[in-house]
Amino acid sequence: MATVLVKELIEAGVHFGHRASRWNPKMRPYIYARRNLIHVIDVRETVRGLLRARKYLQQVAQGGSLILFVGTKRQASDSIQREAQRCGMPFVSDRWLGGTLTNFRTIRSRLTRLEELEALRASDELGTYSKKMQSALTREYRKMYRNLNGIRAMNRVPECIVAVDPKKEKNAIREARKLGVTTVALIDTDSDPDLVDLPIPGNDDSIRSIELIIRLLADAVLAGRAAAGDFKADVPEGPAMAE
């Protein structure tokens, strides 16, 4: 298993770090070498971090707790949404709204507005508004849908968050640490591993690298839910957004 995993990780380019000039010295234990001014991540450390994270996520999912997937950078957005939906967990893939965790009640109230707009669009009432107002309501709906759809069924603060690139998701990591929410993150050579509870050292800019790591973590969540006899997703995909 470990040999096959190492091969997959290397093929996905997980071992390619950032330019050496951009490194965070705290990542030294996870770096294998420097090649052509680029740091090469020790894949053995990636495997260790990945196995620890998978074991933890499986336990969390088996216990029935929520896991929030977070990845708003362009390379991570699609993978985060797809894999979170596949394992039935909430996600943030477009923009982290300040207070998503620390001001959870207010965020939940905004979901009520999203539901109001969806009900309005589904009825004939929208046609009674002026074209200018219809346009404004449509813009409001699309913006709220992008920001809130992934967490519409997150009815409580999650047990942990899974993030891609803690530098990019610093606000999410900060809120999680403030509340004592466990953090799991794919972390490159330019980040501070001390800010993450379960770091997975690896390339957080490559689409293939991100897809592989997030897929393997989602598989662990599914395994945990299956062990608990829970095959039904708690977080539905939600209605499709109109063009």
Image (cartoon, rainbow, N blue to C red):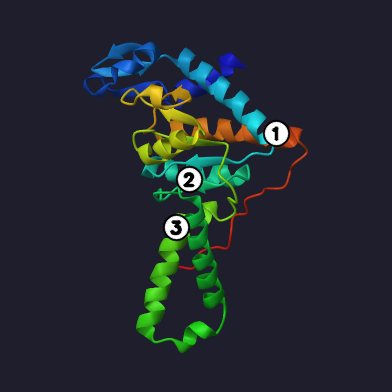
Q: Secondary structure at mark 2?
A: loop
Sort mark 1 into few (<14), some (14-19) or many (20+) by Cα contacts within 10 Å: many
Residue at mark 1:
62
Q: Amino acid at mark 1?
A: Gln
Residue 84 placed where, x, y %?
A: 56, 43
Residue at mark 3:
146
Q: Amino acid at mark 2?
A: Leu
Q: Residue at x 36, y 37 (%)?
A: 170
* Mark nearer the N terminus (2 vs 1): 1
Q: Which mark is residue 37?
A: none
Sort mark 2 into few (<14), some (14-19) or many (20+) by Cα contacts within 10 Å: many
* Mark nearer the N terminus (2 vs 3): 2
Compared to 42, does 12 lie above or below? below
Q: Residue furthest right?
A: 229
In the displayed structure image, the side of residue 54 where residue 223 appears, left or right: right
Q: Residue at x 42, y 36 (%)?
A: 173
Q: Residue at x 38, y 11 (%)?
A: 29
Q: What distance separates the C-alpha of mark 2 from that of mark 3?
A: 17 Å
Q: What distance separates the C-alpha of mark 1 from that of mark 3?
A: 29 Å
Residue at mark 2:
101
Sort mark 3 into few (<14), some (14-19) or many (20+) by Cα contacts within 10 Å: some
Residue 89 placed where, x, y %?
A: 59, 44
Q: Nearer the viewer, mark 2 or mark 3?
A: 2
